[in-house]
Structure formats: C-alpha cells, structure tokens
Amino acid sequence: MINIFDDELIYHVADYDVILFGMGINNSFSGGFANEIAVNFPKVRDDENRDSPYGDKRKYGDVYETECDGIIFCACYMHNGGYRKNGNEYVDYESLKLCIDKMSQKYKGKKIASPLIGASKCDGNGNKERIMSIYRDAFSDCDIDIYVCVQKSAREKAHSEIVSLMEKKRKGEITRGEYDDVMNKIYWEKEHGIFKEMPEGYKRKRKTFSWDDVITVRKEDLEK
C-alpha cells in the first residue's frame, strides 16, 4: 500500500529503515533530495562516489545501497545526470521500474520511504502519473511512504528562503538582528545540513569567492 505525504522527506528520514532516492549514472548529488542526503549524510555520498564507477551505463536499473546512522540509503540509477529547465524528460522509465521492483521485494516488511523518484526536474522531469503507476505495481502487496513535495536545487531552495526573508525585512516584520540570525541559519544548513546544531555565535562568511556561493535576488522577486 502507498501512503502519500505532502512534505519534505529529509525531515523524516530517521523514522524509516530504508530510504530510496534517484541517482544519475554520473554520481551527482547536486540537486533535490539527493543533495539533501549528501549535505546531511555525507557518508552516503562518499561511499557512492568511491564504489560506483562514474558514467557507467551498466548501472541503469541497478541500486547502490549503503548504511548510515542505522538507515539503509538506496541510490536508484534511472537517469543520465544533468538538470533540465526546459521541461524535457530525462528519466529512464524502464530503469526506474527495475530499481523500484528490486527494492520492494528486497525490503518487504521494512519501513520504506521515497520521494516520487523521476518526477522532479532534479532527477528525471518525468510524468508523475506514469511514475506513480510504477510504484503502485511494485508495492501492491507491501508498504511505502511517498513524499511528493516539489524538489529544488540547493541554489533554488536557498534563493526562495532568502527572498522571503528579505521581503519580511523590507516590510518591517522582522528586525535586522532577526534577519541576520535567520540568514546565518540558512547558510549553516546549506553547508552542514539541518541535523547538525549551529554553534552559538556562528556568523556566515566565505573563505574564498565562488560564483556557486552567489545568490542573486532581483527586484521583481520581492514584488511577487
């Protein structure tokens, strides 16, 4: 049976035995739920990068499994990497089906959770109904919790948080001190994740300049 939750899975991973997530054959953890795993559970990223050959097409339909903090994380290889802004699909549906079928049988009876793999622009940009049918077939006689919250790249997520914060400051809903506190928290979580406690007195800073650290906020963003 499938249970649907409109929430971000990263906040609930500790409630499960097994976590599924989408992965390209180029081992990229740069966007969406995969990025959240890499930031919060770096061992998962490090193990996968060490053991999984980069760009190997033979990985399609296969799953890399590693354990961290008592949770089994399963990287399902079902796309060729990249990030599509133009709406084109790049999910490999047959590979996705193979991955989901394997995991439903192997971990039957375990508490399993997954985003709707392949439906996000971060991991396939595929057709949600077609992907959901793959899950329904695979989990017809066992359980899984699916979290359908829209996945964003790390930059998009930070950008939306900062735009909202700047708007509150502009309207006088928060003080400059409160603004700085939240900004520090945003940058801390972007680098260290949501589970590692931010040290008292932490202030955001950049050791070296990188365009990856720059988040542009346009005037029209604040006016939406």
Image: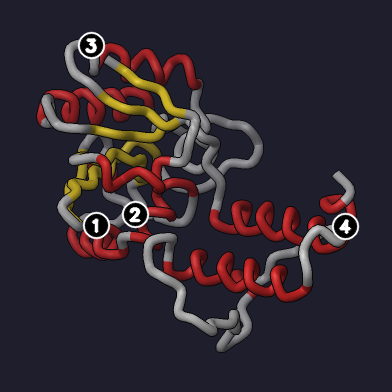
Circle on res. 27: 2
User: Which circle's residue, 3 or 4, is located before the other in the chain?
Assistant: 3
The CA distance from mark 1 to mark 4 is 45 Å
**Rendering colour mode:** secondary structure
Q: Residue at x 18, y 25 (%)?
A: 104
Nearer the observer, disc 1 or disc 4?
A: 4
**Residue bearing the label numbered 1:** 48
Dot 1: what SS?
helix
Q: Which image quadrant is residue 97 in?
A: top left
Circle on res. 101: none
| Dot 1 amino acid type | Glu
Q: Position of residue 55 (x, y in %)?
A: 32, 52
Crowding at mark 1 (Cα within 10 Å: few <14, some 14-19, many 20+): some
Which one is in front, 173 or 47? 173
Circle on res. 171: 4
- Circle 1/circle 4 CB separation < 8 Å: no
The CA distance from mark 3 to mark 2 is 30 Å
**Residue bearing the label numbered 3:** 140
Nearer the observer, disc 3 or disc 4?
A: 4
The CA distance from mark 3 to mark 4 is 50 Å
Dot 4: what SS?
loop
Which one is in front, 206 or 171? 171
